[in-house]
C-alpha cells in the first residue's frame, strides 16, 4: 500500500473542487459577498485536508505519534484486541490539526476491524468503547504487537483506513485519516516507556511517543 502525497489528502479533493467551483460560479454571477465567503471556505477545506511531509525521529527504535494533536491521556488500560493491560496514549485531533494518520512503527498489518458506534465527545472515557472506531493491529520488530484505534467523535463521522491485513508498512507511512478530527489511541508493548506528557502537542510520523526501556 502506498499513498503518495500531493500536498493534500486525496479524499479532500472532491470537497475542494466543489467549493472552488461554487466560488467561481458566484464570481461569474457577480455575487461578491458569496464569492468571498466561498473563497474562505475553499481555503479552509484545503487547509483542513493538508498532508505535509514528515521526518521521523533519528532513534530508529522510537515509536512515532500516529496522529497530529494533543496528548489527552496516558494510562494503563485493557487492549481492545488482546484483553491484556497495556500502556495507552490517546491523542486528540481538533478541527485545525492535520488529519492524516501515520504508522507508529514499521511492521505488518495483522488486523483491520471497523466497529460501528455512537458519536460521543472523544474526551470522554466511554468514547473508546462506545464510539464508531477502527482498530488496526501491527506486528513490529521482534513480533511486538501495537494496537491503534481511530475513534470518530461529535464532528468527525468518517473514518478512512487505507491499510489492509498483510500490508507491510514503514514507520511514518500514511495509513488513514479521520475527516474533521477526532482521536487516535495507541496501545504499546510493556517494553516501551512514554516520553511525552499529557497536554503536549505531537505531530504524526515525527514526534516520538515512546522509547525502549
Image (tube, rainbow, N blue to C red):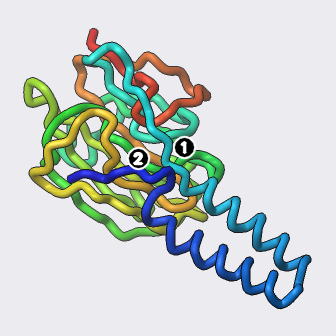
- N-terminal of the pair, mark 2 or mark 1, is 1
Q: In the structure shown, which secondary structural element does the residue marked by tag 1 occupy?
A: strand
Callout 2 touching callout 1 (CB < 8 Å) = no
The disc at residue 55 is: none
Question: Which residue is situated farthest in the front direction here?
Answer: 28
Question: Which residue is situated farthest in the bottom direction here?
Answer: 29
Residue at image point 66% right, 74% down = 20
Q: In the structure shown, which secondary structural element does the residue marked by tag 2 occupy?
A: strand
Q: Position of residue 23 (x, y in %)?
A: 74, 77
Mark 1 — residue? 92
Determine if residue 89 is in view.
no
Q: Position of residue 209 (x, y in %)?
A: 41, 24
Residue 145 occupies quadrant: top left
Residue 88 occupies quadrant: top left
Q: How many marks?
A: 2
Residue at image point 59% right, 69% down = 16
Q: Quadrant of the C terminus?
A: top left
Q: Position of residue 123 (x, y in %)?
A: 57, 47
Q: 69 left or right of 42? A: left
Judge the density around disc 1: few (<14), some (14-19), many (≥20) Cα neighbours within 10 Å.
many
Against 11, residue 148 (above or below) is: above
Q: 95 left or right of 110? A: right
The disc at residue 101 is: 2
Residue at image point 65% right, 75% down = 19
Judge by depth and name the residue closer to the eye, 203 or 40.
40
Amino acid at each position: 500500500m502506498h499513498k503518495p502525497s500531493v500536498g493534500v489528502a486525496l479524499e479532500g479533493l472532491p470537497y475542494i473542487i466543489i467549493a472552488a467551483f461554487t466560488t467561481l460560479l458566484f464570481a461569474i454571477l457577480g455575487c461578491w459577498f458569496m464569492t468571498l465567503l466561498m473563497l474562505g471556505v475553499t481555503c479552509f477545506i484545503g487547509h483542513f485536508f493538508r498532508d505535509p511531509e514528515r521526518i521521523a525521529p533519528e532513534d530508529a527504535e522510537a515509536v512515532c505519534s500516529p496522529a497530529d494533536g494533543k496528548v489527552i491521556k496516558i494510562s494503563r488500560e485493557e487492549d481492545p484486541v488482546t484483553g491484556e493491560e497495556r500502556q495507552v496514549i490517546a491523542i486528540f485531533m481538533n478541527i485545525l490539526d492535520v488529519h492524516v494518520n501515520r504508522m507508529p512503527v514499521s511492521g505488518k498489518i495483522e488486523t483491520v476491524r471497523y466497529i460501528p458506534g455512537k458519536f460521543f465527545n472523544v474526551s470522554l472515557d466511554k468514547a473508546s468503547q462506545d464510539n464508531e472506531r477502527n482498530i488496526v493491529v501491527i506486528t513490529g520488530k521482534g513480533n511486538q504487537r501495537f494496537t491503534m484505534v481511530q475513534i470518530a467523535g461529535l464532528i468527525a463521522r468518517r473514518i478512512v483506513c487505507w491499510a489492509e491485513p498483510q500490508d507491510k508498512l514503514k514507520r511514518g507511512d500514511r495509513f488513514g485519516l479521520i475527516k474533521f478530527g477526532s482521536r487516535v489511541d495507541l496501545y504499546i508493548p510493556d517494553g516501551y516507556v512514554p516520553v511525552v506528557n499529557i497536554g503536549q502537542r505531537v505531530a504524526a510520523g515525527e514526534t516520538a511517543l515512546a522509547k525502549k526501556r
